[in-house]
């Protein structure tokens, strides 16, 4: 299993286990966690046409942390975000 630099799995631990005795090994990813303080975040006003990777780049200097934005905004349907929606962007 390859984990690429910049992937959200980059700092995770990977182990392998088999479901049966002498069976094939299956990867198990133990996610690392970012310290997300719910009181410490930026507010970003969504503009029509923006993508999470673009917003991630603006705040985190990398497009690969888009999932942090999704994680702290579970109430938002990211397939149809109305313009003007205020998104929380965790300050990690």
Image (cartoon, grey):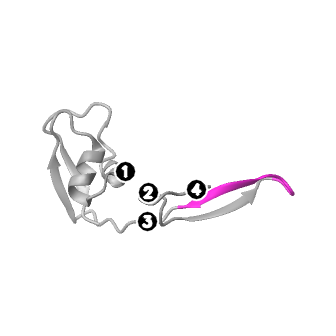
Q: For numbered disc 1, what is the local secondary structure?
A: helix
Q: Residue furthest bottom?
A: 35
Residue 47: x percent and y percent? 15, 38
Badge nearest the viewer, 3 or 4:
4
Q: For numbered disc 2, what is the local secondary structure?
A: loop
Kindly identify which residue carries mark 2: 8
Residue in view at x 51 percent, y 62 percent: 31
What is the crowding at mark 1: few (fewer than 14 residues within 10 Å), some, or many (at least 20)?
some
Question: Residue 33: which numbered mark, if any?
Answer: 3
Q: Are marks 2 and 3 in contact (CB under 8 Å)?
A: no
CA distance for labels 2 and 3: 10 Å
Q: Is residue 42 above or below residue 77?
A: below
Sequence-wise, which precedes: disc 4 or disc 1? 4
Residue 77: x percent and y percent? 31, 36
Badge nearest the viewer, 4 or 1:
4
Q: Is residue 6 above or below residue 53?
A: below
What is the crowding at mark 4: few (fewer than 14 residues within 10 Å), some, or many (at least 20)?
few
**Residue range of the region highlighted in magenta in the rendering:** 20-30
Q: For numbered disc 3, what is the local secondary structure?
A: loop
Kindly identify which residue carries mark 1: 67
Sequence-wise, which precedes: disc 1 or disc 3? 3
């Amino acid at each position: 299993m390859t984990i690429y630099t910049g992937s959200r799995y980059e700092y995770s631990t990977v182990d392998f286990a088999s479901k049966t005795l002498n069976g094939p090994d299956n990867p198990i990813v133990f996610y690392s966690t970012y310290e997300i303080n719910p009181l410490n975040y930026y507010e970003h006003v969504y503009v029509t046409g923006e993508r999470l990777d673009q917003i991630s780049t603006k705040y985190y200097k990398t497009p690969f942390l888009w999932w942090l934005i999704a994680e702290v905004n579970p109430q938002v349907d990211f397939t149809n975000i109305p313009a003007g929606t205020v998104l929380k962007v965790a300050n990690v």
